[in-house]
Amino acid sequence: MPKRVGMEVSIGIAEAVKLCDVDVISAYPITPQTHIVEHLSELVANGELDAEFIPVESEHTAISVGAGASATGARVYTATSSQGLALMHEILFIVSSMRLPIVMTVANRALSAPINIWNDHSDIMAERDIGWIQTFAINGQEAYDLTFHAFRVAEDEKVQLPVVVNIDGFTLSHVIEPIELVEKELVDKYLPPRKPILTLHPDNPVTMGPVGIPEVYTEARKQLEVALMDSKEVVVKAWQEFKKIFGREYHPIETYKTKDAELIFVTMGSITETAMLAVDKLREKGEKVGLVYIRLWRPFPHEEFYNAIKKAKILAVLDRAISYGTNSGPVYTEIRSSLFDKKKKPYVQGFVAGLGGRDIPTERFFEMIEIARSAAEKGECPQYIHLDVKED
Amino acid sequence: MMPAEEKAFKGLKARELPKEELFTQGHRACQGCGGALALRLVMKAVGNRVIVANATGCMEIISSAFPQTAWEVPWIHVAFENAAAVASGIESALKALMRKGRLKKEKIFVLAIAGDGGTADIGLQALSGALERGHDFVYVCIDNEAYMNTGIQRSSSTPFGARTTTSPAGKKSIGQVTWKKNVAEIAMAHHIPYVATVCPTYYQDMMNKVKKAITTPGPAYIHCLAPCPTGWRCSPNLTIEVGRLAVETGVFPLYEVTNGECKINYPHRRLKPVREYLQLQGRFRHLTDKYIEIIQERVKEEIAKLQALEKFSSFYKNALANF
């Protein structure tokens, strides 16, 4: 029987990385990512994990070391957050376009200014278009499980792309949750050693990262887009395989009590569990509400999303970041764009809440349902409503 | 390098130079490019059991326009400021994979190459980090003293008085008003096993130092002055001559620092006047006698400092040995 233990989620992630037998870890400390890499360095120091742990001098170098190591054929892991992810920005595009599998946990945190160490999604939303596969965990078990999945997908022969696993800073990274730990033999069955297609080695010299003149640049970037879109199939298969071996089931889009729902909340990340509570309470009052949460953010599962919401009349989309200057949040924009060509589609109301660690209690979802309903009745489209803002 | 091999290596003779070209012809460098010549010599000294991490810059642009490549060895370019970081990753991966039995155990060298912008300016932090962490690699800075690839803009490695497109000489400016940043000294401050300055004019000295650097365990730093006829505004047939004068005038002395002990290799006789070096180059054409004198004084000071370091470091090493 698998063991279920109370464990800080960051430690759980580090233990998962250990079971994946990584070769190179490069990381720079940033709150709230620190506990993950601290624990990994301990595992290396104690000889429990045979890997090179490189305590670099910046996140820019953390990801650059990862690029060099991945190109040499190593299994590579890093983790970061907020400003650290922003500092990596330049290299993130290069890693995906050079098809270098790297797995990175992002403990999602607000961006400065003002400086704020608490949770929202503005860090990863600023990196939406980096060409990485991006998943979101809603609890500790998922943060743990998605780590194995990330390596399996990243290194798949057909994929060869880097993967971000998003976990909410503090609300996931620093809480103790019950996690069902997996056995090493099963991980070895799920995740074979990396078999890179091309590596840097004197026996077979290759030139990586050459100049792309206009005659070839378009094709190189198109290749990345095709690879990322095509990765969805592997992502889904890897989850099916995960279910077979470990018993837990994952999908690109998840639903909660949506069967007869007229109004559906759309969330990502750990706030999903609060939304579930809100749905339960509303259901007790007889409200026909449900919840859809996005696990696979990139590549965006348009088809699965539509199938999950097509029967609803109203969608209430909760963003944890603002897309500045568009009067919108990034998830809301994505969904409206995804539904634009559909003949039958629900009314979509956007909300932004929970920036920089501001709490989102269940009451906020009750508020959302009222606003979304009255907006839908009036047929108005005020883009997004920013909840819980002190105006005075 | 094995100890026996280290003993055997007494320096390359001209007739022993490897014929194999690992940085091959057909690249897109300008006529008389000192950087391309330097790379050719570096690769002859290093041999083919190496992985190269190249920063963005002239050397990367001229050698890797897809689908062609001038590289006969495994080579990677990621970005401008991270050659030392990428090299750190390669070295760490080799270490881990060989230890874990996934790669055959053998010596594979790691070489990072960057220009003066990628080293003295934007890449300084990554370089310092890699040297401090002690990765087993060699970093070669191909210093042509400005951002030549983007059109001759000044860097912190541009010498005092040089005219560039962002340090133009005008009624109120003599061009570059700051003194050249000394990255070799910065590298020395990391107390790494080997630091050397080279110039392709002195090709045997250069190749011997590169060979020594690559076979020294731990990090090594090589600073290479690479004359750039395009940016220095001189005739392409003067590359070798300008390099020689940079050394003979003391503007760019050649020395090596092995485990803290400094040895000056060139100039080994009286300094030639700096004017002989400056007058060959259009970038210094606007300088009046007054400024040439200022440069002359600075060169004397720098050489005196270097000679003092040479004396002190050998004195110190002897004292330590007898302590």
Image: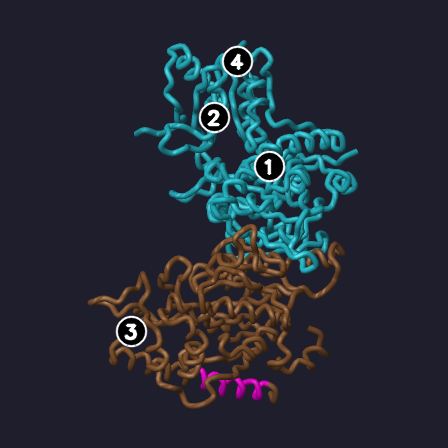
Chain colours: A cyan, B brown
User: Which quadrant holds the C terminus of chain B?
Assistant: bottom right
Q: Secondary structure at mark 4?
A: loop
Q: Amino acid at mark 2?
A: Leu
Q: What type of secondary structure mainly makes up the magenta span?
A: helix
Look at 38% across and 86% down and name the residue there.
B272
- Viewer-side label of 1, 2: 1
Residue A380 image point, x, y percent: 37, 15
Look at 25% across and 77% down and name the residue there.
B288
What mark, if any, has residue A277 been given in the picture? none
A125 is within the stretch colored magenta: no
Residue A8 image point, x, y percent: 62, 41
Q: Secondary structure at mark 1?
A: helix
Query: Residue A315, relative to residue B198: is it above or below?
Result: above
Part of the protein shown in magenta: B306-320
What mark, if any, has residue A227 been given in the picture? 1
**Along the horizontal axis of the image, is A348 left or right of B94?**
left
Query: Residue B321, relative to residue B59: is it above or below?
Result: below
What mark, if any, has residue B285 been given in the picture? 3
Q: Does residue A28 appear in this view?
A: no
Q: Nearer the viewer, residue A7 or A36?
A: A36
Q: Does residue A34 appear in this view?
A: yes
Separation (CA) of disc 2 from disc 3: 65 Å
Mark toward the start of the polypeptide (4 vs 1):
1
Q: Amino acid at mark 4?
A: Ala
Q: Nearer the viewer, residue A373 or A151?
A: A151
Give the labeled residue for mark 2: A318
Separation (CA) of disc 1 from disc 2: 29 Å
Q: Chain of mark 2?
A: A
Q: Nearer the viewer, residue A47 or A84?
A: A84
- Viewer-side label of 4, 1: 1
